[in-house]
Image (cartoon, helix red, strand yellow):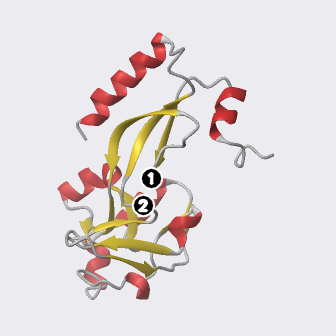
Amino acid sequence: MSQERRPLLEHVAAEAIDLAIRLVPAPTADLISTRLMNTRYRVCASPHYLAHNEDLKGSQDPVRHQCLRFALPEYRTHWRFKTQENAAFEVNVSGHLVIANALSLRRAALAGYGPALMADWLVASDLAEGRLVDLFPNYESTATEFDTAAFALYPSRAYLPQKVRVMIDFLREKLGSH
């Protein structure tokens, strides 16, 4: 069985991993989990891109644009939105550029190559400084589940090394404020 398909608990045990950090909709049931911080997603584009594609801002139809897509399978084909009234809908997306690294995806969006769905913690400073614009500020957006977070995952509560406990506390303190 490939490492990708091997259950996470088995992989963690086989590699003698004390602590794993995962960005997931829900933690895997085979490990103990601690929520470190919530993650929200934003569809963002640069002001330069918007200046040349004014019809995108406020539209519910990014499908006509060359979207920047993250390489994970569920991020490549559709983005999900939820209104303030909790009505959810999906929008199919396409684009020639599929990027496997979140930092590179952010750089491509900043360079004006198109709109991208990115985690709020990745683009918060860009949004605050005006380098990126949240295209759908009145919607929640995601590619998978709306309730996603960064989780600390570890194999057992029965034997939790002090170094793991200290690291979890540190991460909660640093990430919890975001």
- First of labels 1, 2 by sequence position: 1
List the single residue furthest toward the right.
Answer: 1
**Above or below 45: residue 8:** above
Drawn side of residue 178 relative to residue 41, left or right = left
The picture places residue 161, in percent across and down from the top left corner, at 51, 13
Q: Please give the residue where the numbered disc 1 appears in the rendered image.
A: 25
Quarter occupied by the C terminus = top left
At mark 1, the secondary structure is: loop
Q: Amino acid at mark 2?
A: Glu
The picture places residue 129, in percent across and down from the top left corner, at 19, 56
Residue 35 falls in image quadrant: top left
The picture places residue 62, in percent across and down from the top left corner, at 38, 82
At mark 2, the secondary structure is: loop
Q: Given contact means CB atoms under 8 Å apart, are the residues at marks 1 and 2 in contact?
A: yes
The numbered mark at residue 172 is none
Crowd rating for badge 2 (residues with CA inside 10 Å; few <14, some 14–19, many 20+): few
Instruction: Tell me which residue sits at (27%, 35%) in the image.
Output: 176
Depth check, front residue: 49 or 7:
7
Depth check, front residue: 111 or 94:
94
Question: Could one spot residue 138 in this view of the protein?
Answer: yes
How far apart in space, not on screen, are marks 1 and 2 (Cα)? 6 Å
**Above or below 175: residue 112:** below
Residue 45 falls in image quadrant: bottom left
Q: Please give the residue where the numbered disc 2 appears in the rendered image.
A: 145
